[in-house]
Amino acid sequence: MNEEKRRVVIIGGGITGLSAAYYLQKEMLEKKLDIEITLIEASNRLGGKIQTVKKDGFTIERGPDSFLERKVSAGQLAKDVGLESKLTNNATGTAHILLKGKLYPMPEGAVMGIPTKLTPFVTTGLFSPMGKMRAAADLIMPSSGNGEDQSLGSFFRRRLGDEVVENLIEPLLSGIYAGDIDKLSLQATFPQFQQVEQKYRSLILGMKQTTPKRPANQPKNKKGMFQTLTGGLQSLVDAVEDSLNDVKVQKAVKVDEIVKKDKYHYHVSLSNGKTLKADHVVITTPHFATACMLPHADYLAPLTEMDATSVATVAMAFDSSAIKHDIDGTGFVVSRNSDYTITACTWTHKKWPHTTPDGKILLRCYVGRAGEEAIVEQSDEEIKQVVLDDLNKIMDIHAEPDFTIVSRWKQAMPQYAVGHKKMLREINGRLAADMPGVYLAGSSFEGVGLPDCIDQGKAAVATILKYYQN
Ligand code: FAD
């Protein structure tokens, strides 16, 4: 065991940095390691993109609202900080696609838009007979053979045709990244689809084989596959922060630069003029901020070219009497072939009933996506009006909202372009050689979902701990 005291500086207090701090502290205490941990956050609060607002009995998420339960690390973190009893799954209901002004229920059995059941796909009005026939070509088409990266668009267009992609798959997949599926990397976003194609040749048949079947005794739609916390996701941030007793947390201080002194010794210069010494540095900031901290590292240049799109979430609270045309379901995504500005809308009061007082309605819409970001620059009032006009076309809303909360997220959705994984391998290889002990983690790199970010924080901790092994 190396007995020398080590200093670890974690940069960024979003969920990645918080997870790194939390799990490093846990290991340090359990293994009695001598580590000084410092977490530096530029803003005056922790949580980064996680921000919950409580207003008039509503619980409103400005940023992320939930996480996938099957990616276990987010639920595990909640349990680790004592919030297990506050975990709740979404109420299930039909999700819809808005196409050319009409809402269509998602065909039953569609997994990320890929059909796994015949009848709902054949009978849906989402596609023309020609579009359906083209998608069926997937059943006989050979696999693309090579395991090269490609765009999500080229992969799905080849397998299922343009119509199924544009009317169903694009709005679902691009919703997660607010991106352009013809640019997003298949391998960095949904590598499982390529693996299914390689193994089963047909995507439809492969997804049918690999999608878990509901046990016969389990009622249909028992619980949803997403989880959140009844106190809002900010409660997770607060609980992690409260438990960081052995971490020096500095808020409202920005890291300006990381300078190498010698192998494993770094100076981290802060915006308050101070300098921290560090043996390990975990950088969890967005990629453009990360590149600025290491100006000498020319191999980080690809990060400065990496796109990030801007979106805004718009939460609107109403009295239930305000909406005349209530639709059964949990929300909808909007196809690009529609004359709408909103890109998605969640009927939050139905999907997450704990968020909304009785007799009220809470809608949360998104505006902005790759190629349609100008709306995010408009004033709150303009955005509110655009969203209300769009909603009115579908839902017949007869009153002003009780209140509206517009949250802008500028350059907040990192875009994993084709070749992203290769770029990361190259950057990480060069960084490890140039600055051993400095690690990159967070949503710009190995996944944007909250569990992906937590996993990256944990992975950085595991790498640091290797230095303590005999
Ligand atoms: P961030 O949260 O961006 O944290 C980085 C931190 O670094 C920030 O606090 C920032 O202030 C700080 N920082 C920046 N520069 C410096 C510096 N120089 N010095 C010190 N600190 C610095 N994911 C889901 O799983 N489910 C969802 O429902 C979901 N919805 C989303 C909705 C929206 C609108 C957005 C924007 C994202 C959503 N995501 C969702 C994605 C997820 O929220 C993010 O990927 C995740 O929160 C990113 O966490 P992070 O710690 O990597 O980065």
Image (cartoon, helix red, strand yellow):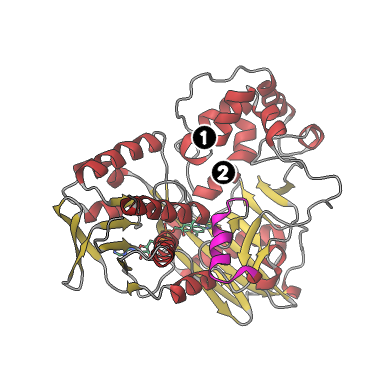
Q: Which amino acid does label 1 sit on?
A: Leu
Q: Which residue is drawn at 67% across and 29% down?
A: 206
Q: Tell whether 20 sits left or right of 401.
A: left
| Residue 200: quadrant of the picture | top right
Query: Would residue 423 be seen by someone viewing this image from the given angle?
Result: yes
**Number of numbered discs:** 2
Ligand 1 visible in quadrant: bottom left
The secondary structure that most of the magenta stretch takes on is helix
Q: Is residue 154 magenta?
A: no
Give the residue pinned by disc 1: 152
Q: Where is residue 365 in the image (x, y as percent from the top left)?
A: 58, 61
In the displayed structure, 123 sits above or below 11; it is above
Q: What residue type is labelled 2?
A: Leu
User: Which class describes the residues within 10 Å of circle 2: few (<14), some (14-19), or many (20+)?
Assistant: many
Instruction: Locate the N terminus by quadrant.
Output: bottom left
- Pointer 1 residue Cβ closer than 8 Å to ligand 1: no
Q: Residue at x 65, y 34 (%)?
A: 164
Chain-order first, disc 2 or disc 1: 1
Secondary element under disc 1, as helix, strand or loop, is helix
| Residue 314: quadrant of the picture | bottom right
Q: Residue at x 58, y 60 (%)?
A: 75
In the displayed structure, 66 sits above or below 370; it is below
Give the residue pinned by disc 2: 173
Secondary element under disc 2, as helix, strand or loop, is helix
User: Which class describes the residues within 10 Å of circle 1: few (<14), some (14-19), or many (20+)?
Assistant: many
Query: What segment carries the magenta color?
Result: 70-84
Marks 2 and 1, how far apart at CA: 9 Å
Residue farthest bottom in this picture? 56
Which label was assigned to residue 35? none
Whether pointer 2 and pointer 1 mark residues with C-beta atoms closer than 8 Å, the reply is yes
Query: Would residue 381 be seen by someone viewing this image from the given angle?
Result: no
Q: Which of 191 and 57 is in front in this view?
A: 191
